[in-house]
Image: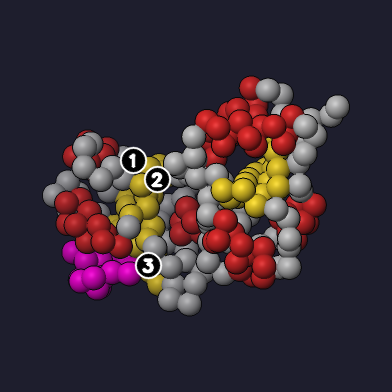
Amino acid sequence: MNKGKLYIVATPIGNLADLTFRAKEILESTDLVACEDTRHTGILLSHYKIDTPKLSFHSHSGQAKVDKIMVYLQGGKDVALVSDAGTPGISDPGYVLIQAALETGIEIIPIPGPSAVITALCASGLPTDKFLYLGFLPVKKGRQTIFKKIAESEYTVVFYESPHRLRKTLEQLSEFLSVNARVVVAKELTKFYENYYRGTLSEVLAKIPEKPKGEYVVMVIP
């Protein structure tokens, strides 16, 4: 029996119209969609009238869930792996499944599309020929080390931050950066309230609300 294929499918980071034609075809034709949140992905699938079965696969999924998906693949079923938004395997648990599939000879096929990192960078106005991506910063342990690494970087540094930690992170980062360091904070990419805050750290902090809401990508050139 031939083994199935594992498709790594990028999905919209906000605007549902950003789903590619190829991604739609794959989501329609595969036997299963493995997704972080079935309700969240269900909105996307419903929008495009796709009725492919869904199975949750998130950061709290154990080995049993990986094994279950592998049974599909080993049995000749094709599986589409998606995250809540953007490209799977970037700051989500997708790499665990991808590693398991590779170890058993499953073919991996990436379906490119939206990525919050690239979307933010291309409109930031900061150098993009080389950049350092840090994902989500540690909540407690290791933050000082990360801030030092950002300050010492020769390239544009990109990371994600939650709204309730955004201001605190920028304030802490200001202790390590020069006053002239350039900062861009992208808010709610591709959504109705999309916005960019640009300037020095002090200028950006002055523009950001006291109680930010939404999703943020922070970019810094020390």
Of the numbered discs in the image, which one, if any, rests on residue 135? 2
Looking at this view, is 186 or 22 the one in front? 22
Of the numbered discs in the image, which one, if any, rests on residue 154? 1
17 with respect to 188 (left or right): right
Residue at mark 3 to residue at mark 1: CA–CA distance? 29 Å
Q: Amino acid at mark 1?
A: Glu
**Which numbered disc flags the more N-terminal residue, 3 or 1?**
1
Q: Amino acid at mark 2?
A: Gly
The image quarter in which residue 180 lies: bottom left
Q: Residue furthest bottom?
A: 192
Q: Is residue 198 magenta?
A: yes
Q: Residues within 10 Å of mark 3 (few under 14, many from 20)?
A: some
Where is residue 107? Give x, y as percent.
73, 32
Can residue 156 be seen at all in this image of the molecule?
no
Of the numbered discs in the image, which one, if any, rests on residue 190? none
Q: Residue at x 80, y 34 (%)?
A: 76
Looking at the rendered image, the disc whose residue lies closer to the viewer, 1 or 2, is 2
Q: Amino acid at mark 3?
A: Gly
Residue range corresponding to the magenta coloring:
197-214
Looking at this view, is 222 or 195 the one in front? 195
Can residue 32 be seen at all in this image of the molecule?
yes
Q: Residue at x 53, y 50 (%)?
A: 36
Q: Residue at x 71, y 47 (%)?
A: 32
Residue at mark 1 to residue at mark 2: CA–CA distance? 18 Å
